[in-house]
Image: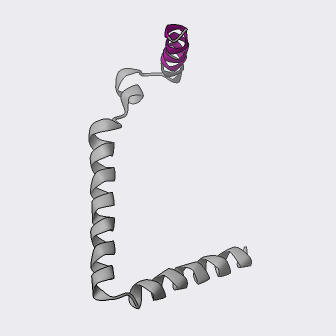
């Protein structure tokens, strides 16, 4: 366990020092990139990846039957 913690600590220090020593322009660009990625991920999660199975089915059996039906129907349609 100790080598994993040591590796993670060195990895964190590597990126922390790199960000700390970065120019002001580079730091602003990375902040913009991180903000854009966060917004894109949140919007995709809310609008495109809704929890369809939990909304429409009550039991695990119903969910699994629906998924199996969708997989087998889509395979039949492509032949």
Q: Is residue 33 left or right of residue 64?
A: left
Q: Position of residue 20 (x, y in %)?
A: 40, 89
Q: Which residues are magenta?
A: 65-77
Q: Residue at x 50, y 10 (%)?
A: 73
User: Relative to 50, does residue 36 appear above or below in the rendering?
Assistant: below
Q: Position of residue 76 (x, y in %)?
A: 54, 8
Q: Residue at x 26, y 39 (%)?
A: 47
Q: Is residue 34 left or right of residue 14?
A: left
**68 drawn magenta:** yes
Q: Main secondary structure of the magenta part?
A: helix
Q: Residue at x 37, y 28 (%)?
A: 52
Q: Residue at x 66, y 81 (%)?
A: 6
Q: Quadrant of residue 44?
A: top left
Front residue of 61/68: it is 68
- Quadrant containing the C terminus is top right
Q: Position of residue 74 (x, y in %)?
A: 50, 14
């Amino acid at each position: 366990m100790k080598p994993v913690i040591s590796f993670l600590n060195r990895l964190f220090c590597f990126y922390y020092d790199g960000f700390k020593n970065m120019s002001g322009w580079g730091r602003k660009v990375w902040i913009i990139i991180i903000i854009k990625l966060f917004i894109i991920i949140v919007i995709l999660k809310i609008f495109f990846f809704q929890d369809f199975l939990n909304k429409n089915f009550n039991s695990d059996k119903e969910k699994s039957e629906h998924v199996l039906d969708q997989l087998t129907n889509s395979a039949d349609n492509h032949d």
